[in-house]
Amino acid sequence: MSLKRYHTLYPYSIFRAQIVFKNVAPPDDKWAEGVLCRDPEGAFSIINRKAGEGVYALDPVFIDTLGMASGFMDGSKRDIFEGDIIRICRFSGGLTENVKPAEIVSDEQEDELPERTVYADIPEEAEELSRIEGVVFMNGGTFCVQFYDEASKTLNAMPLYMFFGFDMLPAEGAAVKVIGNMYDDEELFAKTLRLSDNAQN
C-alpha cells in the first residue's frame, strides 16, 4: 500500500467547498473548511477543520464550489466566504453603552477594552436606514458584495470592508448576516440578483 503525497495550495488561506460523498447519502452539513490540497492525480481535497475539536479530516471536494474565506464575520461571528449570500442593514439608534468613538490604543490597553456588541439583525429599537442583499465574490484581491440596485435597476457591487470594523466584525450601525450561499440556495441566489429579470431584459 502506497501513501499519496498531497500538495497544499495557499497554506495560509482558508477555503470552503462541498464534500464529495461516494455511495453514501450526504449529511446536512456537506461542506468542508480548511486548507486546500491537491494529490498527484490532480484531485482536490480540504483538510477539514470542522471534523471536531482538535480533529481534522481530509475530505475530497467539488472544486467548482470552492470559495475563499474573506476574513470577515457576520454579526453571529460566522465566517463569510466567497459564494455566501449576505444581508447588510444600516441602522440608526439602538447602539449599546459600550460604543465609544474610535481611539488609538496600545496593545496592552486593547486587551482591557470591553468586547463590543455586533449585530446580525438590527436591534428592535433601531430604525433601518438601508438594506442590501447580495453575493460575496473577490475582484482584484478585494472581497465585494454584488447586489441588485433597486434605484438603477442594475447589478452593482461594493467592497465588503465598507461595512466592517478593524476587528473584521460588522461596523457600528451595521447589521450583517449570512442568509445562504449560491450553491445550496439556487433559488435565493437567483432572487437576490434578480437573474430572471435580467434575462428578460
Image: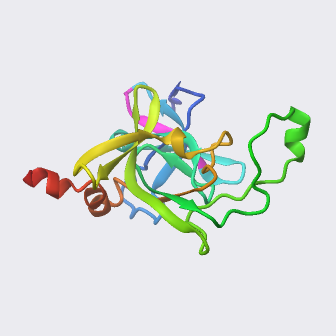
Q: Residue furthest left?
A: 200
Residue 137: x %, y % from top left: 39, 40
| Towards the viewer: 140 or 25 | 140
Residue 61: x %, y % from top left: 41, 44
In the image, 98: left or right of 197? right
| Towards the viewer: 149 or 101 | 101
Q: Is residue 97 above or below residue 5?
A: below
In the image, 80: left or right of 148? right
Residue 110: x %, y % from top left: 85, 40
Q: Residue at x 78, y 62 (%)?
A: 97
Q: Residue at x 8, y 54 (%)?
A: 200
Residue 88: x %, y % from top left: 48, 56
Q: Check residue 39 for magenta coloring.
A: no
Q: Quadrant of residue 74?
A: bottom right
Find the magenta span and give its range: 41-49
Q: Quadrant of residue 156?
A: top left
Q: How many marks?
A: 0
Q: Is residue 122 above or below residue 11?
A: below
| Towards the viewer: 141 or 100 | 100
Magenta span main SS = strand
Asked whether residue 179 is in view, the answer is no
Q: Residue at x 61, y 74 (%)?
A: 125
Q: Is residue 28 above or below residue 115?
A: below
Q: Check residue 42 for magenta coloring.
A: yes
